[in-house]
Image: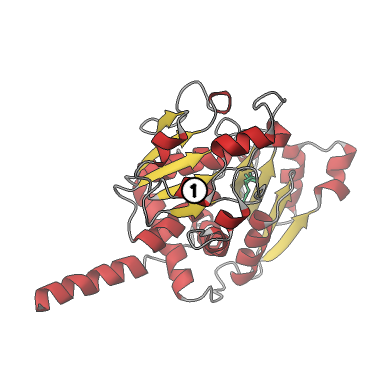
Amino acid sequence: MRRHLLTLRALERPQIEALLDAAQAYADDGGRSRPALAGRPVATLFYEPSTRTEMSFELAAARLGAVVLRCDVDHSSVRKGESLVDTARTFEALGAEVLVIRHPASGAPALASRHVEASVINAGDGMHEHPTQGLLDLLTVRQIKGRLEGLRVAIVGDVLHSRVARSAAWGFTKLGARVILTGPATLLPSASPVPGAGMTSSLDEALEGADVVMTLRMQMERQAGGFVPSLAEYARGFGITDAALARARSDAILMHPGPANLGVEVSLDAAYGARSVISRQVENGVFIRMAALEWVVGRMETRRPSTVERHKALDDMAQVAG
Ligand code: NCD
């Protein structure tokens, strides 16, 4: 069945788990190629800058054998005023089965999806959602902690403008983790965007007992200004340093979606330190995007047991034997 992937809000827990399991199977295979999209065009339309997301979608598409049609927005007909829908329809006419869209306007990929037969994947829309980022965050934590259920996840920083925070909060909450959103009061929405996710302007409260600390980039391009007195003051209050991490659990891990403003929302020492899983997040982005591309075109392989499940099965067997 052909689908779109626009939000994690709209996905049910079993769908999220199926995507994580498929991605984990790719990770177990070391990202080996599988020709699920052999010769089929996949278009990437990025109306905002990107390094990790765009490159990992390209690599994921290549590993599935697809032909990537990369729309260089600044050198395309978008510069002549072509609308998003017209651009999407043009790529569809070129044969694209999947349109991967990043856009500064919240809801832009959803709008495009209503005007094309192709599958649309939201690669980040304004301040709304970034579902494949949320999925790769879930996969990373599940690999390291062996579970998601019952974990405490602190999401720190510019929550107000962050699509990463929204997708992560939906994903972790749906999979049974407890999410606490924190930042200066000026950078928090008036109410928690995700039912079940807590919100506090006290970093200490958020870090207390946290298994996962996720810092967010200050979204300077989305801030009208005046949200914090200065970046230095923000860093002193909410920047994640080794000292701040020491307030979380002793085995807490540090995440950041990238790109990081080192010295602002996260210190260089913490970002490159032993608790940081930032590179693992990037690595997992490719596996998640392979799974997402297959899922939207209805060609995701039937489930193979994930590493976590295999370990659990082995533990169960050991217990029975013991
Ligand atoms: C994020 C994005 O663009 O939403 N980056 C990413 O996709 N890895 C986070 C950000 O830019 O702050």
Q: Tell me the residue at 51%/60% (across/down).
A: 277
Residue 234 on image: x %, y %: 62, 34
Residue 189 on image: x %, y %: 52, 25
Residue 33, image quadrant:
bottom right
Q: Give the camera-side residue of 49 and 217.
A: 217
Residue 76 on image: x %, y %: 85, 48
| Quadrant of the snapshot with the C terminus | bottom left
| Outermost residue, front side | 243
Q: What element does badge 1 sit on?
A: helix
Q: Report which residue position mark 1 lands on.
A: 243
Residue 72 on image: x %, y %: 81, 52
| Outermost residue, bottom side | 321
Q: Give the camera-side residue of 296 and 14.
A: 14
Image vertical order of residue 205 relative to residue 174, above or below: above
Q: Tell me the residue at 57%/39% (across/down).
A: 163
Q: For the residue marked with disc 1, what is the amino acid?
A: Ala
Q: Tell me the residue at 52%/32% (across/down).
A: 183
Q: Let me know if residue 81 appears in the view.
A: yes
Q: Tell me the residue at 71%/62% (across/down).
A: 68
| Outermost residue, top side | 190
Q: Give the camera-side residue of 66 and 14.
A: 14
Image vertical order of residue 241 relative to residue 284, above or below: above
- Position of 50 compared to 135: left or right? right
